[in-house]
Every structure is written in structure tokens, then in C-alpha cells.
Image: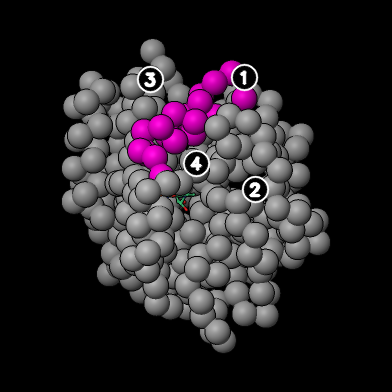
Amino acid sequence: MNTKVYVVTGATSGLGKAVALELARTGATVILVARDPERGAQVQREISNATNNSNVELELCDLSNLSSVRNLAVILKNQYDKIDVLINNAGVYKRRRAVTLDGFEEMFAANYLGPYLLTRYLLDRLRSSSSARIINVTAPSTTELNFDDLQGEGQFNPLNAFGATKMANLLFTFELARRLQDTNIRVNAVHPGLVRSSLMREAPAPLRFLIWLTSSAPEQAARDVVSLATEPEFENTHGKFIRKGEEVEPPAYALDPDVRQKLWEVSENLTDADEPAANYDPTGSVAMHNDKEIPAGIIRPQDEPPQK
Ligand SMILES: NC(=O)c1ccc[n+]([C@@H]2O[C@H](COP(=O)([O-])OP(=O)(O)OC[C@H]3O[C@@H](n4cnc5c(N)ncnc54)[C@H](OP(=O)(O)O)[C@@H]3O)[C@@H](O)[C@H]2O)c1
């Protein structure tokens, strides 16, 4: 019996769905994190039926909403004594600047800040695994961060803003790896290559066409991510940027210790990550869990929001 517990974000399409399917074939518990309840349930059924695995679970979370992230963390911590692998895969590209309920630019929140907070909150369950792994799915971005305008309030260029989130994923990976050096948790970033998916559906048509021409099926890239998540040969791989199972050189900026430290501090302040803050979820993601017992620590949409 496979007792591993895998958490995969962005499991409703593209790479995340293909990764979750491969992981489910191992017979392990696979927790699909999705923001859309109906599509989430459909993918859960699909994967469970295709793999004959009844331990494919669905949890709902809008990663761009920090309350929703906190609620997901509380729910996961309530249901699982340990988590073996967290795959931060979800990502979004937006042509126009949009602002989340928390006041962050949407790509920055969904691609970086939400996953940062989720990872921080799940560390104690990862510590309970005999050998845990965190895999951050990103790209070889060379976009440097503008710390004076992380939310793109000044000039907003969607490709730059997206590139900055992928750079933030790299900086976070290397800083987290440094901080977890002497623990049981291994942290790496992975570049899946160009994957045929819905990610760039809002990108200009010529770029979409180019990506379509040069990309491969998600199943191919998924195999690389799954082997990083499961294979003993990667048990000691830590603080690396991986492409097709091989270490690749990250952009120099991503390794800059000052930038890494600065981003960590800024993120901690923006998310209150060091406080087990009360949760209030105005989007009602908790209400979607009505069929489950709501664990202590979660404030439901009908409750009073906590005073700031
Ligand atoms: N495609 C590529 O060529 C490529 C290259 C390098 C790196 N990557 C990275 O690979 C990862 C997966 O991308 P993909 O290509 O598979 O794209 P995709 O098919 O668009 O899948 C993205 C997933 O993320 C989910 N998601 C987006 N925003 C979310 C939010 N706020 N809360 C929760 N879930 C959210 C989506 O949910 P919905 O279904 O609800 O939208 C979907 O399940 C991303 O991190 C991306 O940056 C992709």
C-alpha cells in the first residue's frame, strides 16, 4: 500500500492534471487543489476512474486569495498528519492588470504570493514526512523584480509581470532551500519546458502560435515532474533548478542572496505568514466544503470578518 500524500495545485488542466494522473497511478493519496468546484470534481472522477485509485481527493482554493489559502492549509492540516510532496504548479497569465480582494496584482498573488503562503503553512506537515519534497514549477525567467512596484501599479506589461512571478518562484525556491538545508525537506524548482496548455490563452495570437508550434504534450513534461517527486535518485537533490531530470543553471539574479532575502521579508509582511491569522473567506471557498466537517480555525463566510 502506498501511504504517500501528494498535494498538486492547478490540477484541473495542463501539466498539473497530467502530474496528478501519473501520481494517482502509484496508488498514493493525491490531493487535487482546484479553484473551480465543478471542474475539480470532474477531474477528480476522471483521474480516480482512470487509475482505480479511490484516494484522489479534491480541495478547493483560489490561490490568489490569501484567506482561501489559509483555509486550505487549515483543512489539509486537519485531515493529514503528514504531507510527503507539495507541487506548487498552478499558474495564470493575464493580459490586463487585475487586482485581487487582498489588493495584489492577480498574477503576483496566484503565481507567487499564494503558493509562498501555502508552502509556509504546510511546512510542519512536510516536516512530519520521513522524506519530504517541495517542487515549484516555474520557468527560466530573467525578469528582475521591481521592489518599488511589485503590484505593477505604475507601468503594467503583462509578459514582464508574468516573468517576474516566475523569477519570484525561483528566488523563493533557493531561499527556502537555504532555510531548510538541515531538515528532511528537499526543495527544488522545475522547468517543464514549453507545454501545450491553456496557460497563455490571453497572450497575443502570434505568441500563442509560436508556443503551440514548439511545445509538447503535458504528459511528457509531467513524467519529469513526477520522477522528481517520486524517484529515490532525487532524494538528496536540494536547491536546484531542474529540467528533464538534469540540473540547469538558473539566471544569476535568482541566486542573489540579498534579493532572495528581500523577497522573503516582503512576502512575509504581505502575507502575515508568521502569524496563524484567523481566516475570513469572502469568496466562500469554505462554503464549498459543506459536505465536510469544518475544522476549528476556519471562519465561515457568514461569520464576522476579523478586525485588522
Ligand atoms: N505551458 C508552458 O509552456 C509552461 C512553461 C514553463 C512553465 N510553466 C508553468 O507550469 C505551470 C502549469 O501551467 P500549465 O501550462 O499547465 O497551465 P494551465 O493549463 O493553464 O494550468 C494552470 C492551472 O493553474 C490553475 N490556477 C490558475 N490560477 C489559479 C488560482 N488563482 N487558484 C488556483 N488555481 C489556479 C488553473 O485552474 P483553472 O483550470 O481554474 O484555470 C489550472 O489548473 C504554471 O506554473 C506555469 O507557469 C508552463
- Secondary structure under tag 2 reads helix
Q: Tell me which numbered mark, 1 or 4, is placed earlier along the sequence.
A: 4
- Secondary structure under tag 3 reads loop
Q: Tell me which numbered mark, 4 or 3, is placed earlier along the sequence.
A: 3
Report crowding for label 1: few under 14, some 14 to 19, many 20 or more residues within 10 A (C-alpha).
few
Are the residues tagged 1 and 2 within 8 Å (C-beta)? Answer: no
Q: Tell me which numbered mark, 3 or 1, is placed earlier along the sequence.
A: 3
Residue 266 is situated, as x and y percent measured from the top left of the image, at 67, 68
Q: Nearer the viewer, mark 4 or mark 3?
A: 4
**Disc 3 to disc 1, C-alpha distance:** 17 Å
Report crowding for label 4: few under 14, some 14 to 19, many 20 or more residues within 10 A (C-alpha).
many
Q: Is residue 157 above or below residue 191?
A: below
Residue 162 is situated, as x and y percent measured from the top left of the image, at 51, 65
**Marker disc for residue 192:** 4
The residue under label 1 is: 233
Q: Is residue 83 above or below residue 26?
A: below
Q: Nearer the viewer, mark 3 or mark 1?
A: 1
**Marker disc for residue 26:** 3
**Disc 1 to disc 4, C-alpha distance:** 18 Å
The residue under label 2 is: 173
**Residue drawn where x is 31% and y is 46% of the image:** 13
Asked if ligand 1 lies within 8 A of label 4, the reply is yes
Image check: 213 left or right of 166?
A: left
Residue type highlighted by circle 1 = Glu
